[in-house]
Image (cartoon, rainbow, N blue to C red):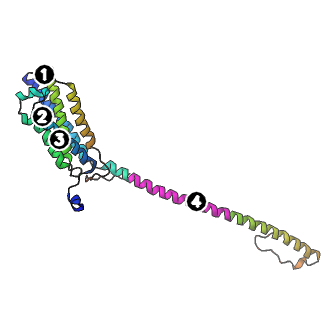
């Protein structure tokens, strides 16, 4: 049992846990969007495939599930995609508010951009147990 | 929506997403300068605290020794004064007996009779 535990790749501390949590959330959103177009984004069906919308959420989720084992800064791609997906979706909601104002809820924008903001904030944070392999610049006075 | 509006909105969407994504990427790979400064500060603070504690201990020790030396100097000075007074009395007795010329002069350096 101990051998198995040591053999498994270790999730990178709090950053890894954050990526796991958000990966699960994004995967659920991708799954939900794969079943049907969100009402607020139905206008998009005239411009792009349904799979693109699913991929916007599924790709960051998959990358997050991989990068949660990597030390900082190798997990940068995960945070970039986790940020881009909700910001992109929020913008699409705003466009939807102009395209079909009767069906677009402002709450979608708030929720999506809050997700993006949370990732942006956490991307600069480091937990005590996180592996951090960034370059170190030694500061010397004078 | 018109075509140009859709194009404009798409461009704004891509730009916003790219900007946010770029921020997250930069925050992730940012050079660890502040953390090192913080750690250096904490290390320096620890070293300084040790030095201050050692100096305080030395000051306490020196104060104790200084008190002891001052007490000893006071005792020696009192004894010296008593001895000088005793010498005056002996010199007076010798002079009274007519042996004043046998008193060795001058007295040792620092002694004034």
Of all chains, the one bearing label 3 is: A
Numbered label attached to residue A81: 3
- SS of the residue at dot 3? helix
Give the camera-side residue of A57 and A28: A28
Q: Which residue is mark 4?
A: B59
- SS of the residue at dot 1? loop
Residue B8, above or below B69: above
Front position among marks 1 and 3: 1
Per the picture, the main secondary structure of the magenta-coloured stretch is helix
In the rendered structure, are the residues bearing label 2 and label 3 in contact, judged by CB atoms less than 8 Å apart?
Answer: no
Pointers 2 and 3 within a single chain: yes
Cα separation, mark 2 vs mark 3, equals 18 Å
Determine whether, in the image, residue A78 is placed left or right of residue B72. left
Q: Residues within 10 Å of mark 3 (few under 14, many from 20)?
A: many
Of all chains, the one bearing label 1 is: A
Numbered label attached to residue A33: 2
Residue B2, above or below A25: above
């Amino acid at each position: 049992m101990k051998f198995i535990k040591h053999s498994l790749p270790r999730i990178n501390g709090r950053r890894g846990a954050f990526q796991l949590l958000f990966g699960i959330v994004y995967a659920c959103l991708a799954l939900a969007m794969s079943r049907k177009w969100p009402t607020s984004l139905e206008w998009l069906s005239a411009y792009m495939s349904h799979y693109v919308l699913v991929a916007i959420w599924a790709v960051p989720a998959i990358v997050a599930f991989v990068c949660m084992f990597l030390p900082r800064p190798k997990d940068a791609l995960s945070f970039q995609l986790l940020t881009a997906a909700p910001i992109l979706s929020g913008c699409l909601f705003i466009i939807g508010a102009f395209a079909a104002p009767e069906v677009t809820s402002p709450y979608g924008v708030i929720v999506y951009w809050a997700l993006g903001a949370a990732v942006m904030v956490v991307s600069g944070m480091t937990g005590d147990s996180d592996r951090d392999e960034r370059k170190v610049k030694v500061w010397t006075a004078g | 929506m018109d075509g140009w509006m859709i194009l404009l909105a798409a461009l704004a969407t891509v730009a916003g997403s790219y900007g946010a994504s770029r921020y997250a990427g930069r925050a992730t790979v940012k050079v660890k300068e502040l953390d090192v400064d913080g750690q250096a500060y904490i290390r320096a603070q620890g070293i300084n605290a040790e030095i201050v504690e050692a100096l305080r201990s030395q000051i306490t020790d020196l104060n104790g020794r200084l008190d002891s030396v001052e007490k000893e100097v006071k005792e020696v000075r009192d004894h010296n004064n008593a001895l000088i007074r005793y010498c005056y009395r002996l010199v007076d007795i010798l002079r009274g007996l007519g042996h004043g010329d046998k008193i060795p002069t001058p007295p040792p350096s620092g002694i004034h009779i």
